[in-house]
Amino acid sequence: MRGKKRPTISLILTVKDEAASLPGLLASIAAQTWLPDEVIVVDGGSRDQTVAILREWIARLPLTVVELPGASIARGRNAALERARGELVAVTDGGVVLEPDWLQRLVEPFLVDEREQPDVVSGFFRAAPHTLFELALGVTTLPDVEEIRPERFLPSSRSVAFRRSWFLAGIRYPEWLDYCEDVVFDLRLRRAGARFRFRPEAVVWFRPRHSLTEFWRQYYRYARGDGKAGLFTGRHLIRYATYLGLIPAVLLTRDRWLALVAGLGALAYLRRPLWRLWRRREVGPERLVVAALLVPLIRLVGDLAKMAGYPAGVAWRVRRYGPRRTWRTIAEPVNLADAGVPAGVTPAGETRLPTG
């Protein structure tokens, strides 16, 4: 630990109806090379044996179980942060399994010389598919680590650690959002001056959705969250322009050059997932071909789900906050002095609005 005392570490997560996956996650926490000083799990109202399983582990982990029926993921994480006592907070999620050195890898960057210490350490996450469909879904929706640009990477709250002082300063997970809450949390931290460090060795594994129906529901909700927060508007507009403009134009005009452009664009769109799949060619040639045929279908279903979800989210936001409000102004007040932020660094106009 480079001669420095290890800070107090709280590990927090939220769960709901995770009885099937929870034993694996808890076992992976217990197997960490650096154990957290406390583990706080907030249950959002499970109807299966999730809470019972958690209580069975209290004797084996420094575990606190908080039951908040009906709580959103954001509310659950904030509730855990309110109870945490660690200087550093690591966050993960239900349905994952942690690499044995996950927590150690996340915490080590905080132990260097004070001038080089980050405020946030971004871990990474990888798919652990059980079926051919899950393999195809994983390569279609998740980048490989080599594709990540660390300076732009927004960590998933499946795998991240940060100083709790930022929470004390007023930066919260947005409880008015049911999805994309970790993206907005990351963006708030960036705007407030937090220093991020990418630590790809801090890996968690999770199983992708099991079917097209589950995937549709997931991506519809993600896009609805984008619409509620006002996130990634440009990306969504490009998608609408492609599906509602370019593709109909090709079909109606039958212009060969336009068709060629559209075809090249489609190949470029599928290039990365097919390359990721090729890198997993140890699955065998027959399975590789079937998975490759699934990739365009998964892309199409995901895009259509996003196109359906985004306007639903925008409509929700306009009804509640008006057309000009986005995540930038639907926010909590921030007291940077509580986070130890250097003088001269200020958030860009954080204001508090009712979340109703």
Image (tube, rainbow, N blue to C red):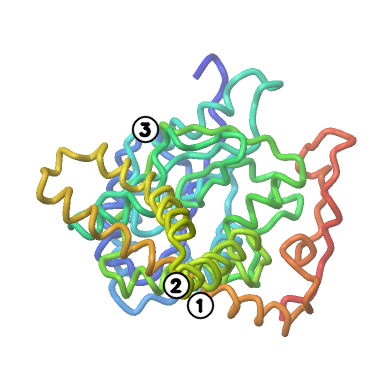
Q: Nearer the viewer, mark 2 or mark 3?
A: 2
Q: Position of residue 18 (x, y in %)?
A: 32, 66
In this view, 121 is above or below 60: above
Disc 2 + disc 1, Cβ < 8 Å: yes
**Is residue 88 left or right of 148 when viewed as pictured?**
right
Q: Of marks 3 and 1, which one's residue comes earlier in the chain? A: 3
How far from the left and from the top, in percent, is residue 213?
A: 32, 75
Name the secondary structure under disc 2. Answer: helix
Q: Look at mark 1 in the image and give the residue it sits on.
A: 308
Please give the name of the residue rendered at 11% of the width and 43% of the height, measured from the top-left corner: 284
Specify the farthest residue to the right.
344
> What is the crowding at mark 1: few (fewer than 14 residues within 10 Å), some, or many (at least 20)?
some
Q: Nearer the viewer, mark 3 or mark 1?
A: 1
Name the image quarter holding residue 346.
Answer: top right
| Amino acid type indicated by mark 1 | Ala
Q: CA distance from mark 2 to mark 1?
A: 6 Å
The tag on residue 304 is 2
Q: Is residue 57 left or right of residue 339?
A: left
User: Could you tell me the amino acid type at mark 3?
Assistant: Asp
Residue at left 17%, top 48%? Answer: 288
Q: Give the label on residue 101, or none.
A: 3
